[in-house]
Amino acid sequence: MAAAKPVSSVADALVWQHLGQRPCKLTAQELAQFFHPGRPEELRLALAERLGMDNGGGLQSCLALIDRYGPQPELLMALGMTHQPAARDALLHYLYDPSVDRLVLLRALAGWGVAVPLAVIQGALQHPSQAMRLAGVELLQFHARLLTAQQLLHLAEPLLEDIRPQVTIGAIRLLQRRNEPPLAGRLAQLLQGDSPGPVWETALHALGCIGTETSITLLLECWLACRGTPQAMELLHQLEAQFRHQHVLRQRVEDLLQEGKITAHEAAPLLAGLGDGSETIGARSDPPCSGVGC
């Protein structure tokens, strides 16, 4: 592995001049000749990005540079950008190398999440870093369909309990792609808990987008629990948007009226927004996501 050495600012300016040409006429081999760990980070990133965009040609140049300088972060990202099977294999080779930047490696592998072992993804999901957890969420998307609802919930639980909204929102968007009752139930818990505003809104839209009889029942339960709060109106709008199962919702509301759990005054806005029930005709042809905000 070659050691980094200083590179003159005059040479850097010349490289920038070449990169600034439109279109850039540098070949992958020429880009690789300009790359050096001694150059400023911004310039190294620009060169690596151009290499990654050159697909097959960039792949061979990136591999040659890694052989020379080691797995530099910008070169790993360039490998991922090439979308070549050989790039995937090279990146997977570094999964258990502690000297490689883990976050950069997982981000570079984002397009091949199914090839990343689930244990590696679980480690990322449990990492305290927000960036690492989000990288794990991106990779988990490829495995999610292969897992049971309980397995997916187990992996997502650390994220759903994270105090950082962006992490929790990433997990919510993953769960909403499935329509199993346990996943819908976990989203409903976020609506009835003390969730931050962005998390609550995302969970509401996610539960509405699931669009099953179970999710509608859960939305109705959340609305009942939130009566008299500002969130009640948003829940009401989401319920009114459940076009595929409005007949089910109407029956649920009428049952609640008979059981005395809600008053006619409380039920009136919801029943008024449900129409006359004719929307059940042709319900199977409706799009899978029918909630507000989908």
Image (tube, rainbow, N blue to C red):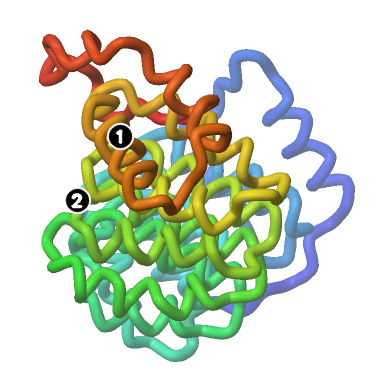
Q: Secondary structure at mark 2?
A: helix
Question: Quick check: 96 above or below 201?
Answer: below
Q: Quadrant of residue 4?
A: bottom right
Amino acid at pointer 2: Pro
Instruction: Tally the numbered discs.
Output: 2
Is the C terminus in the top left, top right, bottom left or bottom right quadrant? top left
Residue marked by disc 1: 249
Tell me: residue 61, above or below residue 190: above
Nearer the observer, 168 or 37: 168
Identify which residue, 262 or 137, lies in the foreground.
262
Residue 160 at what x, y percent from top left? 49, 71
Residue 69 in view of the camera: no
Give 193 or 202, whichever is nearer the viewer. 193
Q: Earlier in the sequence, mark 2 or mark 1?
A: 2
**In this view, 159 is above or below 220:** below
Residues 265 and 127: in front is 265
Q: Secondary structure at mark 1?
A: helix
Residue furthest bottom in the image: 98
Q: Which mark is residue 199?
A: none
Residue 21, position as x, y percentages in the image: 69, 19
Which quarter of the picture shows residue 40? bottom right
Instruction: Name the side, left or right, on which 218 lies relative to 142.
Output: right
Amino acid under label 1?
Leu
Give the vertical position of 31 relative to 136 (above or below).
Answer: above
Q: Which residue is mark 2?
A: 85
Residue furthest right as drawn: 9
Q: Residue at x 73, y 72 (%)?
A: 5
Position in image of residue 293 (x %, y %) = 51, 30
State the residue at coordinates (43%, 24%): 271
Q: CA distance from mark 2 to mark 1?
A: 49 Å
